[in-house]
Image (spheres, helix red, strand yellow):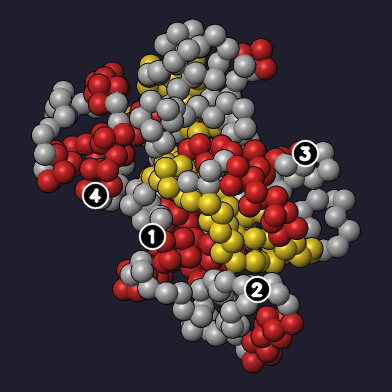
Amino acid sequence: MAFPQPNAQRELANRKILEELQLKKQLLLKQGVASTLNASALPVLGSTPTQSTDGHSMNSLQRAALQTANTQSTGFFISQDSSFGNLILPSISGFEKPKVLLEQYVTPPHLGSHMLYTIQSQYGDLSGKLVADIGSGCGALSVGAAVLDAGLVVGFEIDSDALDIFSDNISDHELTNVDAIQCNVLKDIPIQYVKFGKVFDTVLMNPPFGTKHNAGIDMKFLDVALQLSNNAVYSLHKTSTRQHVIKHAESLGAKAEVLAELRYDLPSTYKFHKKSTVDIEVDFYRFLV
Amino acid sequence: MKLLTHNMLTSKCMKGVSVGYPLGINASDVRVSEVDFNPDFIARMIPKLDWAVLYNAAESIGQLEDLPKDLANNYENDQEFLKKVHHVLLEVDIINGELVCPETGRKFPINNGIPNMLLNEDEV
């Protein structure tokens, strides 16, 4: 897609960010797809706390706090100022007026970028792949996948306002390997996946987790994702629903693997939220079709 | 919207539509933007394409250039051919226009590069 040019100042800032991204990409290339995760990447449950080998600068107090958090909890904390997070998803604009009905939350950049880094470094499922991002929102995952050299990323989103921001994010990062389709993912996804087999290699999603009113909506997203992918689906689901998610995936013939347990640090998005931030425990999944 | 995306789009979710493929294109604004050339990716995409649909789509918006009407033999190693396919699949971008359902004539607007495939309740 082509979009209106950003202003000159922004362009300069973006160029700087892109230069840094290139460095990170070279690092990825050097490490190769098969290399094991180093401590700075996303550890699986029970592994040792992070070291700051990814070069981000934390003061000793922050590091101590992070290590304490890691040792005292079964969850894994990613430091908010992780330089990797800021590198891959440097400046994504979020929802201007989030809609509670669509459960619009921005994927936190540090979390999204660790997801994407793992998907590429561990499994090589982004670079040179045809990638779908369903329920893409403002495009946090789409932008990251495009930066990591996906052949083409196609975002699927119902909401016009989110798509406007999606477009701005794509043009701000001068990405040309991204497309978007406005559609209702759960009702009328306009993709033909029967005639030529499933077309997408990798499907990414950060689905609505579901509330009292629409319980199970994330499983409906999973159904669609598994129909689109010929290889792998990466997704986030609430840890409290783990047994159900694994069973559901199995009933669809897919193999579910929990790659990591994360703390989804959800900043207060809506007026009815009483606390300023809420930690939600979520699992980062890889589903093999 | 790129022609790779167009190649997999259908209107078959509409009530009374059986195939809904391929969607016609009326383009009012087409741009060409440079995309990194990844020959492996293109070679992997080709077997998934409906070649005739790609050819006709490119022709209908005046972006055919010298894309061959038939798939080349041994295209995996034909860099020149893969480059042409790359250009048509990824670099040609429909910014404004509309897609047309082949069975009902229903039009889907394309604005700012994004086709709006949302259906009204009475169309599902």
**Snapshot quadrant of residue A225:** top right
Residue sitting at 53 percent across and 84 percent down? Answer: A52
- How far apart are the alpha carbons under marks 1 and 4? 14 Å
Q: Mark 1 points at which residue?
A: A124
Q: Name the residue under label 2.
A: A76
Q: Do labels 4 and 2 share a chain?
A: no
Q: Dot 4 surroundings within 10 Å: few (below 14), some, or many (20 or more)?
A: some
Residue sitting at 26 percent across and 35 percent down? Answer: B47
- How far apart are the alpha carbons under marks 1 and 2? 23 Å
> Residue B40 or B68: which is nearer the viewer?
B40
Element assignment for label 1:
loop
Q: Are marks 1 and 2 on the same chain?
A: yes
Element assignment for label 2:
loop
Q: Mark 4 points at which residue?
A: B40
Q: Given contact means CB atoms under 8 Å apart, are the residues at marks 1 and 4 in contact?
A: no
Q: Do labels 1 and 3 share a chain?
A: yes
- Which amino acid is tagged 4? Asp
Q: Is residue A204 visible to the viewer in this orientation of the structure?
A: no
Element assignment for label 3:
loop
Q: Is residue B57 visible to the viewer in this orientation of the structure?
A: yes
- Which amino acid is tagged 1? Gly
- How far apart are the alpha carbons under marks 1 and 3? 34 Å
Q: Given contact means CB atoms under 8 Å apart, are the residues at marks 1 and 2 in contact?
A: no
Q: Dot 1 surroundings within 10 Å: few (below 14), some, or many (20 or more)?
A: some
* Subunit of label 1: A
Q: Name the residue under label 3.
A: A214
At which x and y percent is residue B40?
A: 24, 49
- Which amino acid is tagged 2? Phe
